[in-house]
Amino acid sequence: QVQLVESGGGLVQPGGSLRLSCAASISISGLYAMGWHRQAPGKQREFVASITSGGTANYRDSVKGRFTISRDNAENTLYLQMNSLKPEDTAVYYCSGGNFLGRYTYWGQGIQVTVSS
């Protein structure tokens, strides 16, 4: 069974930084697309960022210039560097992977990120 396990979440003050990691139980070099989504209380899950096996990255407008997605195929790990965090970034963040952008087969269990003073 494929597992994606997120880590690195927590409580941070506005303007601070966090780095999320997603460790996969399989080789991610075979996964064309990997991504991060988030879900805030009372809201639907939304796309945050994606990256292809070729390194092409996409971001939702509200995180452009603040978040950076990357993948280390040798370590089977996906990352999300989050800088200049805002209270509206507070959510449960989910890692995902699959062979098509926007259609992810594998999902992590989610990790809480709280931005608050």
Image (cartoon, rainbow, N blue to C red):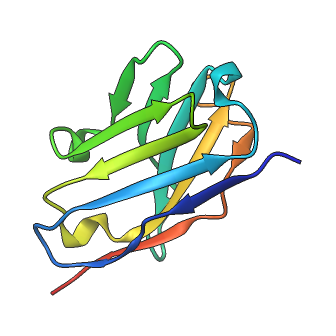
Position above or below: 103 against 15: above
Image quadrant occupied by the C terminus: bottom left
Percent x, y for residue 98?
A: 68, 30
Q: How many marks?
A: 0
Of residue 108 and residue 74, the one placed in the foreground of this image is: 74
Which residue, as the protein is rendered here, is positioned at the far right? 1
Residue 91 quadrant: bottom left
Position above or below: 12 against 76: below
Q: Residue at x 24, y 39 (%)?
A: 61
Percent x, y for residue 39?
A: 49, 63
Q: Residue at x 38, y 47 (%)?
A: 80
Of residue 39 and residue 106, the one placed in the foreground of this image is: 106
Percent x, y for residue 90?
A: 33, 71
Which residue, as the protein is rendered here, is positioned at the far top? 54
Percent x, y for residue 62?
A: 22, 47
Position above or below: 81 against 57: below
Position above or below: 33 against 93: above
* Left-right relation of 57 to 44: left
